[in-house]
Amino acid sequence: MTAATTQKLDRKQVEQLVREVLRQKLSGGPASVAKGSAQAGGGPPHPLVVNVSARHMHVTAAHLEQLFGQGAKLTKLKDLYQDGEFASEQLVTLVGPRQRIIPNVRILGPARDYSQVELSYTDGIYLGVDLPLRISGNHENTPGVTVLGPKGSVTLEKGVIRAARHVHMSTEDMAYYGVKDGDYLKLRIDGPCGITFDRVKVRYHPRVILEVHIDTDEGNAVDIESATHLELVK
Amino acid sequence: MTAATTQKLDRKQVEQLVREVLRQKLSGGPASVAKGSAQAGGGPPHPLVVNVSARHMHVTAAHLEQLFGQGAKLTKLKDLYQDGEFASEQLVTLVGPRQRIIPNVRILGPARDYSQVELSYTDGIYLGVDLPLRISGNHENTPGVTVLGPKGSVTLEKGVIRAARHVHMSTEDMAYYGVKDGDYLKLRIDGPCGITFDRVKVRYHPRVILEVHIDTDEGNAVDIESATHLELVK
């Protein structure tokens, strides 16, 4: 069966039913909760923002052209919290090892040096992929998946992960929390389904500001929309 | 459209695709992690067992007959951890307000004085049902759902919940932890995805032994299979 045939079959089948089955959380934008605010003086340099990352994909420029045709570029659906990052209008379909399908997986832009698929464990169990817990870009011993786009398919040999909880920080954020790149903090979320998440890894980048990323399993476990208090603690 | 027609249509559609889409976690038995062991002397009266409850239903004898025919009884698939509780062989299909379907929802026995459907928030978001967080049996202001069985359907007016985290305890367990019925403990789970769950409610019953119940969102968030240490703390 060629990739094109697979895609056609899948689309026909999924559009009636499976599209209804798997929610594209991202379409409404990721859940976001911000508590506190930036303050002059002794306060934090940036408010504590916790965003729930729905399943998504990052692509290389080459893979983007394979999936969406020669010369294809990512087009912006909406800006994400970090400057320059965006949810694109481009959607792909994932096909797991037993032909199970997850449609409507959004590509986040801009294009990267590597292609990567970030799923929740709920997604991984459904697809039949044993997801390793990884920080973005660490693809050693990670599984692959077949990705379908409107103009072609890509079979990734690796790069399918559950993204490990992490917090993006600027130099000022690290100074405020007394941590350095690669350290771990705990994220305490109070509320009816309150949770303290261990092992939230600090990730420094010169162009980011304070933002925690958790996945949909974690966001639903804590029911982040009902959170009454957020705090990063050592 | 009659209930019977709905059922027929749904079955035909779902059996090819949706059955594949929604995993029946219970079929392999709920994930279970026990750390520590019962000890003579100063140790705990029972080992700390944490079980992940997949989506499931409890039924009254009357609803069971509506769904499975006159005189129907629950038949045992496998025993659960608490004495007398079991996963039955009987499966139902849930139909949400927008005709979204979750098939293969297992009934847990024995029959009860009330019918109740326990789902994760992931399930609720998919079905389009805003799940209230409740302890079993508290159905005030809870939504309903349509339930399909092989011989008929039941439209529940209420009783669809996300089960609040809880820990079943005997008198000896409560004495050991220094708590009483209705108190809250925290459940600390160490591991690569370590989490401390707040607000684990103590539920006393004369015929139960120590067992924590969390749902699949919570079990996947903490990746309970990789847990290295479990502890109930005040």
Image (cartoon, coloured by chain):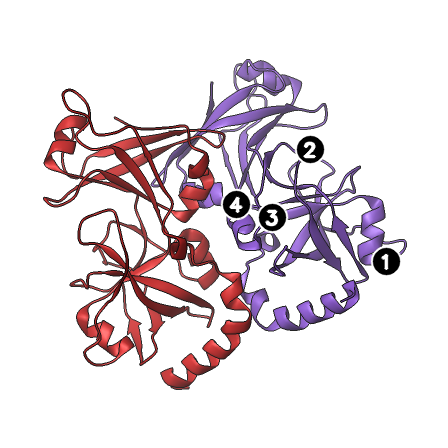
Chain colours: A purple, B red
Task: State which mark lies toward you, 1 or 4.
Answer: 4
In this rendering, the answer to whether B7 lies above or below A206 is: below
Helix, strand or loop at label 4? It is: helix
Q: List x then y, in percent, for residue B84.
A: 17, 54
Q: Residue at x 46, y 71 (%)?
A: B98
Q: List x then y, in percent, for residue A31.
A: 53, 45
Q: Earlier in the sequence, mark 3 or mark 1?
A: 3
Numbered circle sitting on residue A69: 1
Answer yes or no: are tags 1 and 4 on the same subunit: yes
Helix, strand or loop at label 1? It is: loop
Label 1 marks a residue whose chain is A
Helix, strand or loop at label 3? It is: loop
In the displayed image of the protein, which residue is found farthest to the right?
A: A71
- Residues at discs 2 and 4 in contact (Cβ within 8 Å): no
User: To which residue does mark 3 refer?
Assistant: A55
Q: List x then y, in percent, for residue B57.
A: 30, 61
Label 4 marks a residue whose chain is A
Within-10-Å neighbours for mark 3: few <14, some 14–19, many 20+:
many
Q: List x then y, in percent, for residue B208.
A: 16, 44
